[in-house]
Amino acid sequence: MSTVLISSVRKSFGRVEAVKDVSFEVFPGEIFGLLGPNGAGKTTTIRMMLDIFEPDGGQVSVFDGRITEAKKQRIGYMPEERGLYKDLQLEQTLVFLATLKGLAESEAKSRLEGWLKRLDLYDHRQKKIQELSKGMQQKAQLIATLLHDPDLIVVDEPFSGLDPVNTRLVKDIIEEQRQAGKTIIMSTHQMYQVEALCNRIVLIDNGRTVLYGEVSKIKRDFSGNAVLLEGHGDFSQVPGVLEARRQNGAWHLALSSDANTQEIFRHLARQDDVTIERFEIAEPSLDDIFVRVVQEGKQSREVDHA
């Protein structure tokens, strides 16, 4: 049985259609990626799921039915816009937030000590939130999300402001929650983190679900739409190439759906200022797929409005 079921939800604010048609399902024991460009409708969808906004249409089911106050106690939400009280002490803030989720104050303090030590915040527990670094505040927000041991965990940009060591620590914590059978929905623009953690994703663009399913299958479906290239010259202005980026000394080209790799090779070979040392079809990354789907959707809308 799914933890979250979103079916054809819609939401408008005045004349602005923030969400037009979004559907997906999330199950216990998985880390699910909720993806999309800025303004696509991700945050509005999350807020409908959490009963912050009432949808104009469609169905939202959490824990097999409409959300209730009791069900909200089983949810941990880490919003992108952080919500800690900057003038309060760290320990005082986290204990207070845990009591709002139904924990007794003594139980909250007992659980909090271990989390503070694990995330290297114990020696800072008496500091005010505003005295902490951005990375420390990010870790504190994660503790606030998990301290009451929720069954559904929703994290929006969980790695923002973290150095590599703390990024690894947060990834380990998220994976531990998955192994414990929790349902985790992760929204982020860091596609490599999605590839590392998520089994399934939904991509929302312009308020609609445009891609949904297992990461491995999606990448297979888009195979042939990426090229790995080594050489010298400018590879950024090639017909049929949506994005060219340099990574580990090689160029990675994300191709449009109608691009022909042989034509791209011939085009490059004709350029006097280009030298090709390696040219091979590559498995597209989620970055490549994200760029292709979003850019082609934008081009299609521009044609429709022309």
Image (tube, grey):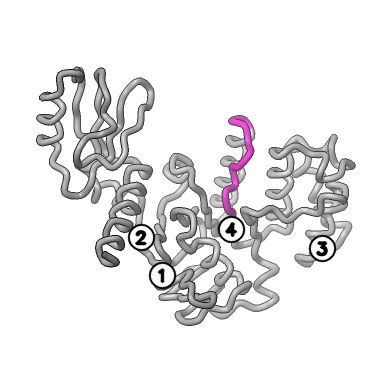
Residue 73 on the magenta segment? no
For the residues labelled 1 and 3, the Cα–Cα distance comes to: 33 Å
Residue at 22% from the left image edge and 43% from the top image edge: 225
**What are the residue bounds of the magenta stretch?**
155-165
For the residues labelled 1 and 2, the Cα–Cα distance comes to: 9 Å
Q: Which residue is mark 3?
A: 99
**Within 10 angstroms of label 3, few (less than 14), some, or many (20 or more) residues?**
some
Q: Viewed as shown, does residue 263 lie left or right of 154?
A: left
Q: Where the C terminus falls, by quadrant?
A: bottom left
Q: Which residue is mark 2?
A: 212
Q: Are marks 4 and 3 in contact (CB under 8 Å)?
A: no
For the residues labelled 2 and 4, the Cα–Cα distance comes to: 18 Å
**Within 10 angstroms of label 2, few (less than 14), some, or many (20 or more) residues?**
some
Q: Secondary structure at mark 1?
A: strand
Q: Nearer the viewer, mark 3 or mark 2?
A: 2
Any mark on residue 154, and which? 4
Amino acid at circle 1: Ser
Amino acid at circle 2: Tyr
For the residues labelled 4 and 3, the Cα–Cα distance comes to: 19 Å
Q: Which residue is mark 1?
A: 23
For the residues labelled 3 and 2, the Cα–Cα distance comes to: 37 Å
Q: In the image, residue 195 lies at what x, y percent?
A: 42, 43
Residue at 48% from the left image edge and 69% from the top image edge: 18
